[in-house]
Amino acid sequence: MDARIRGHDNGSVSSAIPACPSRGNAGSARLGSIADWWRYFLQLTLFYGDIALDIAADLLIADSERRCAAVLLRLSARRFADSDDPEPAGVSITQEDLAGAANL
């Protein structure tokens, strides 16, 4: 399957082959040698997808004080912790980094 790409400078048209595992590039050969490569990729995708959703949920909070508190809870890994947990939580973060994370 060839894709036609128009050049920006002189209007010429050239053929390009999109990256595709069935074409046999070096990356697909390496991934093909590991039978369960997709499981590791899926685990990372789900893990970082959850983090991205938590960040988006924090940024959707309209009140800046509540948004800042939600960011601190997320960064200290206490967002979904039990309130009866006796261990104190701490976050080592500068005010500038916190303001950036909370979009203040």
Image: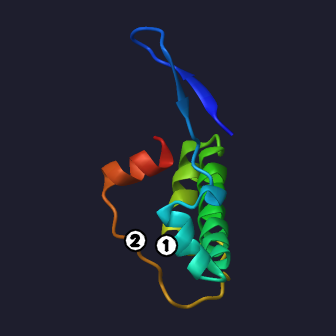
Instruction: Give the amino acid type for the residue marked by disc 2 in the picture.
Output: Val
Q: What element carries label 2?
A: loop
Report the coloring of the rendering: rainbow
Q: Which residue is drawn at 55% across and 29% down?
A: 15
Q: Residue at x 64, y 35 (%)?
A: 2
Q: Judge by depth and name the residue closer to the eye, 57 or 5.
A: 5
The earlier-in-sequence mark between 2 and 1 is 1
Q: In this view, does 3 lie above or below 39?
A: above
Q: Which residue lies furthest to the top in this view?
A: 10
Q: Judge by depth and name the residue closer to the eye, 25 or 60.
A: 25
Q: How crowded is mark 1: few (under 14 residues within 10 Å), some or many (20 or more)?
A: some
Q: Where is residue 8 in the image (x, y as percent from the top left)?
A: 44, 14
Q: Where is residue 26 in the image (x, y as percent from the top left)?
A: 48, 64
Give the number of the disc on residue 76: 1
Instruction: Give the amino acid type for the residue marked by disc 1 in the picture.
Output: Ser
Marks counted in the figure total 2
Q: Which residue is drawn at 41% across and 46% down?
A: 100
Q: What element carries label 1?
A: loop
Residue labelled with disc 2: 91
Q: Which quarter of the image is occupied by the N terminus? A: top right
Q: Position of residue 94 (x, y in %)?
A: 30, 58
Give the number of the disc on residue 67: none
Q: In this view, does 63 lie above or below 52?
A: above
The quarter of the displayed image where residue 9 is located? top left
Q: Judge by depth and name the residue closer to the eye, 19 or 70.
A: 19
Q: Residue at x 61, y 71 (%)?
A: 41
Q: In this view, does 3 lie above or below 78?
A: above
